[in-house]
Image (tube, grey):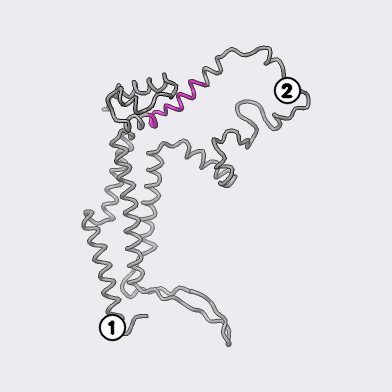
Amino acid sequence: MPRVRDPKRSEAEKLYLESFGQLDLVKIAEKLGISDGTVRGWKSKDKWDTKLNGTLQTKERSAPKDTERSKRGAPKGNKNALGNRGGVGGPLRNGKAVSHGLFRKFLPDDEETREIYDNVGQMDSLDLLWENIQIKFTAIIRAQKIMFVRDQDDRTEVLKRKKRTDTGWEDEFELQHAWDKQATFLQAQARAMTTLTSMIRQYEEMCRQGWADEEQKLRIEKLKAEVDNIKGGGKNQESENWADALMEVAERRRAKVSEGEWQ
């Protein structure tokens, strides 16, 4: 059964729109006896600013026009509208709709980049954070295969450089032992999991503040269960496992050095 919409949510929106966006969100929260974080969440989720802009545009269109000015066109030979196909907006690739010069100045001016930029602009803060969580989680899962170490005899030779000698060319290789690769992987995994956990906590906090709907709450619970599977148990156990593994790597290195086998 769907939850009944909080009447304060509608009242908060009404106060904001009636003030044409001038009433501070903290003031709205104080009037209704709720947290300002909740009001910010409602504003983002219900797209108050979009509704406000629609209201202002409607009023502008309904305002009486200066009929005398509307009869006059541009002077003969004027090229201000050159390239404009008519209708809403300016000519193709016109920069007047860009809110600031950052996009045009620093980002690539190609169709793909513009499409990404436009799509991001339509996302609210919670959805944007969720997309970043998914990207980070995908990278962690993918790393399990890329960084896999078969066993203690798993060694990798990496071509470091080529150098010319008196007899021709000589290849110089870097030898990566299993314990080196495993230690590198554990350290990278620990950093990645710490970042992911922090992002999940931020998402949960935004959910508690009223930013999320039911679907957005459920999807983070599902992801947390999948993360727990990777960790292989509780949070404390995960840290202990990583610490034990790194200590084991150190012990192996010391043993190799003492035996004269370290390279």
The residue tagged 1 is 258
Q: In this view, does 30 lie to the left or right of 86?
A: left
Q: What's the amino acid at mark 2?
A: Ala
Quadrant placement of the N terminus: top left
Q: Is residue 52 left or right of residue 13?
A: right
The residue tagged 2 is 74
The chief SS type of the magenta part is helix
Q: Residue at x 33, y 69 (%)?
A: 150
* Residue 220 image position (x, y, % from top left): 31, 43
Tell me the magenta residue range: 43-56
Q: Residue at x 24, y 62 (%)?
A: 241
Q: Does the magenta stretch include residue 47?
A: yes
Instruction: Say which element carries label 1.
Output: helix
Q: In this view, does 130 lie to the left or right of 98?
A: left
Q: Decide which of 84, 60 is in the foreground and name it.
A: 60
* Residue 242 image position (x, y, % from top left): 26, 62
Q: What's the amino acid at mark 1?
A: Ser
Instruction: Say which element carries label 2.
Output: loop
Sequence-wise, the earlier of marks 1 and 2 is: 2
* Residue 130 image position (x, y, % from top left): 37, 43
Q: Residue at x 34, y 72 (%)?
A: 178
